[in-house]
Image (spheres, helix red, strand yellow):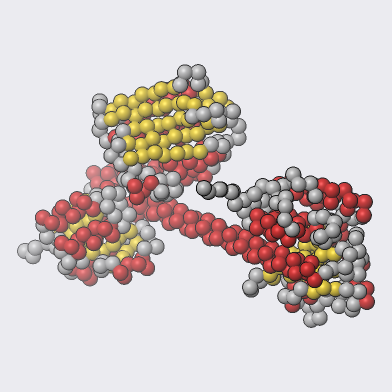
Amino acid sequence: MKKKKRILIVEDEKNLCLLYREELEKEGYKVIAVTNAQKALDLIKKSHFDLIITDIRMPVKDGLELIEDIMGIRKDIPVIINTAYQSYRHDFMTWAAEAYLIKSASLDELKAKIKELIG
Amino acid sequence: MIERYHPFRHQFPQSGSKELQIFSILAQSFFQPFSLKDNLLVILTALTAGSGLGFNRAMLFLVDGNELKGEFWLGPASAEEAASLWQILSNHEIGYSEIIDYNRRLLMDENNPLVQKIRQMSFPLYAAEPSLPALAASSREIIHVKDAFNEPLVDRQFLEIINVDEFLCIPLLSLDEIFGEIILDNAITRQPIKVQDIELASLCGLAAGNYIYVTRLQQRVMEMKKQAALGEMAMFVTHQLRNPLVIIGGFVDQLLSSDIDEKRKMRNLKIIKEEILRLEQIMDRLTRFFRIEIKEKVPVNLMEIFKITMDNIKPFIKSKKIIIESEIEPGLVYVLSDPVYLGEALRNLVENSLEALQDKGVIRLRAFRENNDWIVISVEDNGQGIPEALKERIFEAFTSTKEKGLGLGLAYVKRFMEANGGHIKVESQEGEGTIIKLYFKAR
């Protein structure tokens, strides 16, 4: 059997973590969800991920700092920013993220983007 | 040796030439806390004050759309009135606010014939062949009119009202805008307008134009700041509302799919309910934040409000190593405030302290007299303190570093304190603790 692709979700809302995990597992991915950027960094240092999905505004460390830190460790992991904030979108090109999605009640866009990036 | 002077004077200079006095008034008008119109009135007063030097009367027109509209007409209506007015204004003790008071009273007077006449006047600025007074503003020129009754460029209706054969028109301008026009005359003393008078008046016109320009610019900047704050707020509220909505939508989708079991169904419904409650809470907190209004201040008993605050927080204190205590200066019984808002403010502060302590430390509620004017209620803790980088922003609404919360806590307390006629101060050292002081007027 083909090995499952691993996705790390960084999201401070617990119920959102749960929703994303369940929905993406249905799509055949292995999903790990953490509620802050520090926990995410610790995990990235220890194990392999094929994709990271992160929010921007989070306590302790925000998503942008996280992306910077990730670049310092593993440059090759694609990152999707998934946030409720529209307004950061125009600066997004300067960041090393592959996609910028606005959180939506429909997960179709997110699922399609993941498929496009990691299959 | 050094000598120090305050740059803004409350009294006009008592020595020096008329020119110096006028410029002192003009320069000060930039720094006065009065409205634009009040300050313009003072400039007109400066131009007309005194019998021998300035002008007798001054009219102010302001641009309103495509028209020049009459605003003020300052000066005595007759020779007798002139004598008493100049007497008042030549008093050396008189300062800026006295003149403003005097002028306001003058303009409020419905019977004042000059005020009645000027308010009826308006002239098109961009007519094909503009007449005076509009001509000076539209051509951006200073115009000195002599023998007015035989001058065809002078508007006849205007001439009838001003009823003088010599006057001076000074446009109020910036580089790219026309704001209005000042008309000066010597209707009482009948002295001819001299070259020096024209020079002085034109400089005043320039300064007044600049003053209007800067004031309008300031208003625009304030408006933009407000808009920006509003934008920031809208963004934050959208974000706060979007998360619960996404969660509700996602779990509803699962409910709608055919392969969901009963256990999952119940769990999803529970989550949906939680999120709906959260939405309601967000709306409540926003409503309360925007609606702070203190209609009447009553004596709020300090001992009681401290007790309520402490009783309310105790169930949330999970660690035995956290102590909460209170201290009231002997003789101090109450502060004047609104008990509901004050209770809410204290609850906010104590909750912040509790969060800053993590699992051990002391929260202290204190009330004391800072001096004769102010009574202070302080909430102190020896928790982690506020990081230096955050200090400037802690009172801004919608700035939060916490896992939960709208970032309205301290902004709410600040709004409440301002509505209460007091203020708030923060002293905090990272790693050592925080003191928040609420200042209440002692009387």
Q: Is B370 placed left or right of B49 in the picture?
A: left
- Using the image as rendered, state which of residue B170 and residue B401 is in the foreground: B170
Query: In percent of the image, x 71 and y 67: which residue is there?
Result: B203
User: Quadrant where the C terminus of chain A lies?
Assistant: bottom left
Q: Is B28 placed left or right of B400 in the picture?
A: right
Quadrant of the rendered image containing residue B185? bottom right
Q: Give the number of callouts.
A: 0
Image coordinates for residue B288, horizontal then vertical, percent: 50, 41
Quadrant of the rendered image containing residue B353? top left
Image coordinates for residue B137, horizontal then vertical, percent: 75, 72
- Residue B68 is at least partly visible in this image: no
Query: In percent of the image, x 51 and y 20: which residue is there?
Result: B333
Extreme residue toward the top, this view:
B331
- Using the image as rendered, state which of residue A1 and residue A79 is in the foreground: A79
- Using the image as rendered, state which of residue B198 and residue B411 is in the foreground: B198
User: Quadrant where the N terminus of chain A lies?
Assistant: bottom left
Image coordinates for residue B168, horizontal then vertical, percent: 82, 69
Name above or below for residue B208 compared with residue B427: below
Q: Is B11 placed left or right of B328 in the picture?
A: right
Image coordinates for residue B142, horizontal then vertical, percent: 76, 73
- Residue A118 is at least partly visible in this image: yes
Name above or below for residue B138 compared with residue B292: below
Quadrant of the rendered image containing residue B133? bottom right
- Using the image as rendered, state which of residue B25 and residue A118 is in the foreground: B25
Query: In percent of the image, x 35 and y 52: which residue is there?
Result: B243
Extreme residue toward the front, this view:
B1
Extreme residue toward the left, this view:
A1
